[in-house]
Image: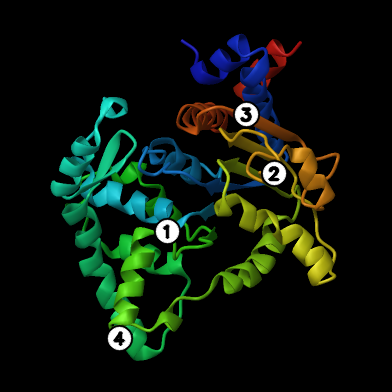
């Protein structure tokens, strides 16, 4: 039996349209890895609630992901899935819900995310009682950290007896273990961003204990220079929004604002369900990014117009198969691509 079932399935079946874009983006990703390149992933939408960690955490362990740009929601929801997994409730018939059905979910102290729900008490409030003392201590000591650093510290010190989810499937835990570079632009727009704001309003915490988005970018200038050495770093984008828009700007900012030499992104792929339209950056084709000096005409670039909850795990599984047996994977790819 083949030890490359997903990769072979993609090579055998994905010939045209969006399936071809998926295949070609996987092959370009592998070529980039073979040459020693690195990859940044951006996480938009509710990918952590959709349990992307099942494949993303192993990909981080395997050295397929070298940096992450995440919304504040995806960051915290990876932790929620770890500590409150058994308390989530799914709603496969959500399309047929009435307003009264959602009112009942609210009354049950749950927050629906499409067909699943985050439990208020077991997730939000359970995590708050651990992270609030960290914020208060930082306020008292005048300590300043990036948003993700508080979550890194928390997830690493949590007693594993508190875990309801599989820690091997928590991408935040794996990223924290490796101290993976993370950017969380616009972290204020998240549940814990709101919770933090409430404690700032009451005077328990100082807003200054969390470094700003501007400081994230200035830190990323240096991180990008390191990550882009050798074969460079690629850009793998899930969805649109600030998680993708923020980090991709580092290249033109270094070039034009700092007026320093910088290497372009070495690869670009976006899984998008955004309709290409007037003024829609999330739905813009990669060519538009050439005009902003974010990509070049030689950058391997792909758009997969599909559902990231289907596409991303499939791609990651194929990439994990390559990583586990690179020699055989390369031979298999050559045999299919003749």
- Using the numbered discs, state the Cα–Cα distance from disc 1 to disc 3 in whole angstroms: 29 Å
The numbered mark, 2 or 1, whose residue comes first in the sequence reads: 2
Q: Residues within 10 Å of mark 3 (few under 14, many from 20)?
A: many
The answer to the question of whether label 3 and label 2 lie on touching residues, with beta carbons closer than 8 A, is no
Q: Please give the residue where the numbered disc 3 appears in the rendered image.
A: 304
Q: Is residue 156 visible?
A: no
State the mark number for residue 190. none
Q: Tell which tag, 4 or 3, sits nearer the viewer.
A: 4
Q: Please give the residue where the numbered disc 2 appears in the rendered image.
A: 36
Q: 304 or 140: nearer the eye? A: 304
Q: Please give the residue where the numbered disc 1 appears in the rendered image.
A: 176
Q: 6 or 274: nearer the eye? A: 274
The answer to the question of whether label 2 and label 1 lie on touching residues, with beta carbons closer than 8 A, is no
- Using the numbered discs, state the Cα–Cα distance from disc 2 to disc 4 in whole angstroms: 49 Å
State the mark number for residue 203. 4
> Circle 1 sits in a helix, a strand or a loop, which is it?
helix
């Amino acid at each position: 039996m083949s030890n490359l079932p997903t990769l072979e399935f993609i090579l055998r079946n994905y010939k045209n349209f969006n399936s071809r874009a998926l295949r070609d983006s996987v092959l370009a990703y592998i070529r980039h890895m073979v040459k020693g390149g690195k990859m940044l992933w951006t996480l938009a939408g509710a990918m952590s609630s959709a349990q992307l960690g099942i494949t993303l955490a192993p990909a981080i362990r395997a050295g397929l992901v070298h940096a992450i740009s995440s919304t504040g929601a995806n960051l915290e929801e990876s932790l929620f899935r770890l500590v409150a997994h058994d308390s989530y409730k799914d709603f496969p018939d959500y399309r047929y819900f009435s307003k009264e059905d959602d009112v009942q979910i609210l009354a049950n102290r749950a927050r629906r995310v499409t067909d699943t729900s985050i439990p208020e008490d077991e997730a939000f409030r359970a995590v708050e009682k651990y992270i609030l003392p960290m914020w208060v201590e930082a306020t008292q000591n005048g300590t300043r950290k990036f948003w993700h650093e508080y979550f890194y510290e928390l997830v690493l010190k949590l007693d594993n007896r508190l875990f309801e989810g599989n820690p091997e499937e928590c991408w935040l835990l794996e990223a924290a273990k490796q101290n993976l570079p993370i950017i969380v632009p616009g972290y204020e727009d998240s549940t814990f961003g709101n919770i933090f704001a409430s404690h700032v309003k009451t005077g328990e915490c100082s807003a200054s204990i969390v470094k700003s988005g501007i400081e994230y970018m200035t830190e990323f200038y240096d991180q990008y220079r390191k990550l882009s050495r050798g074969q460079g770093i690629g850009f793998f984008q899930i969805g649109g929004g600030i998680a993708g828009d923020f980090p991709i700007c580092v290249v033109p900012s270094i070039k034009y604002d700092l007026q320093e030499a910088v290497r372009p992104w070495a690869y670009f792929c976006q899984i998008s369900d955004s309709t290409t339209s007037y003024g829609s950056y999330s739905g813009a084709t990669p060519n538009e990014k050439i005009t902003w000096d974010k990509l070049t005409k030689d950058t391997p670039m792909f758009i997969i117009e599909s559902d990231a909850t289907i596409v991303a795990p499939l791609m990651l599984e194929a990439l994990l198969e390559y990583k586990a047996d690179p020699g055989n994977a390369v031979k298999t790819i050559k045999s299919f691509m003749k």
